Image: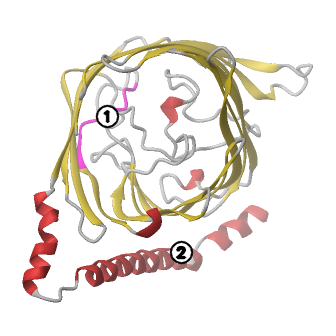
Amino acid sequence: MKAETMRVRRGGSEEGGRAVRGRALRSNLLLSFVLLLAGSLLPVHEARAQDGLRPLVEELRPLLDLRLRYEHVDQADLELDAHALTLRIRGGVESGEVRGFRLLAEADLTRALGIDDFNSTTDGPQDRPVVADPDSERLNRLHLSWRGLDGWTATLGRQRIIQDHARFVGNVGFRQNEQTFDAFRLQGSPASRVTVDYSYLWQVNRIFGSNAPAGTVSADTHLARVALDLPVGVLSGHLYLTDLEAPMVGASNRTVGIRLTGARDLPRDLRAGYRAGFSQQEAAGENPTDFSLAYWELGGDLRRGPFSLALLLEVMEGDGSRGFGTPLATLHAFQGFADVFLATPPHGIQDWKVALAWDRGGPGDVRAALAFHDYRSDRRRPPTAAGLRRDLGQEWNLTLSARPHTRGRLVAELADYRGAGGFADVRKLWLSAEFVLP
């Protein structure tokens, strides 16, 4: 009876009303932005207006982002390996600034180049591992931005949004097809040491590209983050009302949390960093399930010159049916490069991470990093197992990168996951060459 009542309450006229409210909000945002633009450019004399618009073209800036990458995947539960050679071409222009306004337009194209023995999620052999870089061609970004007094900025249109460390909202920059958002975003500082970041999303353009049914998802989503600069570090609070439509209705959630990050200088040229965070999540929007789950992070790092050592514990709870979800996040940067845990297991996960890095800045910009992950379920499985948590495997990650040119970069990455708890062994290798302008 409870489930039936929930379906009635969330369906029918409420769904139609939500769609109408979403369209009305988008229309109001667009109208306000257009009126603001028109008012700022309203000419007193035609000649003056033409002079005022010259920077739009005269200061035009080209945008170019190329990445050629080979990826190999060896997955123990599949007989055949995956081999993928893909090229991502992203290009566009950004106008000069007039009365605080700028216009940016950018398209991208992703193609497999001859070596295409992989499951791209939209085509390719299903008996090979997934390499989520399908062929795609689409408008990556198209937005009008405004920079006002006291550092306030507003952006309307298809754009890249990364909040904080991208654990909850990011662009998934590792994959060839970027995640962008059709959104309105407002950022600024209403008071000393306080910053505000608010976005309203009406569409998510996912990494699966232009040829996938799930490549775009409609949304009615609000993202808010407020940060306070304190002597001990940056204290921030976030509220994410993530309301997504099919096929991601089950990922809709309400997440509220707090996070502290900071660093301190120590004797002997040492510098210590620290971070801690907590978030609570429950169902929202049209999500038919009922859950309440938590997220924890606690970590620190020690740096001296080019060397650093980091320790991190990240916990995502599970209730036995589902785990804590981050549907808008940059997932590859967390819980190992092998991407085994892109979706949190139903019994949750504890990720204990140790990372050692050497980073030489300046000419050449060479970096080497080695990380180890130990994964365990957060919930005892089964409940009678004397309080023991289930082993979910271990993983090694290696990254080597160099910048032989100011606009070019070479990257090699390796992931070696040794499975447990029903998860198969996975080994992945990436070799990339990148060029970015400007």
Q: Quadrant of residue 223?
A: bottom right
* Residue 135 magenta-highlighted: yes
Q: Is residue 48 above or below residue 159?
A: below
Give the labeled residue for mark 1.
176
Residue at figure coordinates x 47%, y 44% from the top left = 170
Q: Where on the picture, by quarter, is residue 234? A: top right
Say which quarter of the image contains residue 110: top left
Residue shown at 36%/55% (left/top)?
159
Q: Position of residue 113 (x, y in %)?
A: 17, 24
Residue 70, visible in the rendered structure:
no
Is 387 situated left or right of 174 in this image? right
Q: Nearer the viewer, mark 1 or mark 2?
A: 1
**On the picture, is 250 further left or further right than 408?**
right
Q: In the rendered structure, which amino acid carries the disc numbered 1?
A: Gln
Report helix, strand or loop for mark 1.
loop
Q: Find residue 193 and report its horizontal and vertical position in percent.
A: 62, 56
Range shown magenta: 130-138
Location of residue 415 in the rendering, given as x and y in whole percent from the top left corner:
48, 14
Residue nearest the observer in this picture, 294 or 39: 39
- Distance between mark 1 and mark 2 Cα atoms: 33 Å
> Hey, what amino acid is under mark 2?
Arg
Quarter holding the N terminus is bottom right
Q: Which residue is mark 2?
A: 18
Q: Is residue 259 above or below residue 289?
A: above
Q: Main secondary structure of the magenta part?
A: loop
Numbered disc 2: secondary structure: helix
| Labelled disc at residue 114 | none
